[in-house]
Amino acid sequence: MTWFFAGLKSIKAFHRALVFFLGRRTAMELDEGPAWLPPLVMSQQSFSVKQETSTVSIEEIPTATQEEVSIEGSVLWQPACGYLRVYSQLQYPGYTVEKWLRQQIVRATAELDMDRVIRKNCLREAVLSDFSAGALHREGDRLIVPHLGVEVIDVQITSVKQPPQAAAAADRVRRESREAVAERTQLLARLEQAVEILRTAEDNGEEMSFAEAWDRASIEGGFLQGIKISGGDSLSQIIALLAKRGVKKDEDH
């Protein structure tokens, strides 16, 4: 029986050491946070976690109605490291925001440096500042899960999908902007070449109108025939035409 009690004491000692090690490891993770946790952005909402149905639903929306905003996703509870992972899609009218939600559990009973925990992981003052849509903008807020005590959830935006109409309008503006820049560049280059052709003709004693130099510059330079001028148009009139196309006076010759 002596060996039995000795073995039992050894098992208890091993168990105490294991509990101490795991408890210390958990406290360290809460304090320092895992190394893979990236800088995240957050938003103020009130959430209800339903682990049995693997969904997350919004209870309170400060700037939108319950019908306008919804959130669903899978919930993975990881008590060993004190995190609640939620992958979800937060849908606003016309917008879908795919997010990773990471929850840092800050236990009231744990003797931790709270400022250090918040500074390391919680990022309570982070904001959703990268979106022009008013409903997506939050400042100085954090996410709360009342069912799990004192905690902070960090939110990482992975992608934002705009409505097709908004995306098409943005593409059209970018395309028109690129076309306008290309046109101004060609007009300036064509003007420079036309002026050079006029100077060469003058040096050679040839008579040439600016309209002829303009057309020759188009042929020699391969420029688009964007502006048509008559033989009576002066250089000042050409400059005025270019100004209407967005060319500034200080860029003119």
Image: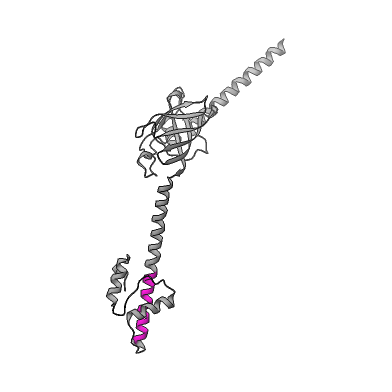
108 and 20: which is toward the camera: 108
Q: Is residue 25 magenta?
A: no
Among the 4 quarters of the image, the one containing residue 137 = top left
Give the position of the C terminus as an image quadrant.
bottom left
148 shown above or below 71 = above
* Residue at x 33%, y 80% (from the top left corner): 210
Give me the residue at 36% from left, 81% from top: 212
Quarter of the image that includes the N terminus: top right
As drawn, 243 above or below 112: below
Is 130 in front, or is 175?
175
Q: Where is residue 177 drawn, in percent x and y?
A: 38, 59
Q: Which residue is drawn at 52% across and 35% down?
A: 34
Query: Could you tell me if residue 170 is visible in this image?
Result: yes
Q: Where is residue 17 in the image (x, y as percent from the top left)?
A: 60, 23
Q: Nearer the viewer, residue 48 or 219?
A: 219
The percent position of residue 198, horizontal first and vertical second, equals 35, 82
Residue farthest to the top? 1
Residue 127: percent from left, percent from top = 38, 39
Colour convention: one colour
The residue that appears at 29% across and 76% down in the rendered structure is 235
Task: Please state the total of marks drawn on the protein image.
Answer: 0
- Residue range (magenta): 186-202
| Residue 188 within the segment the image draws in magenta | yes
- Tell me if I can see residue 116 in this picture: no
Is 86 on the left-hand or right-hand side of 198?
A: right
- Principal SS element in the magenta part? helix
Q: Residue furthest bottom?
A: 205
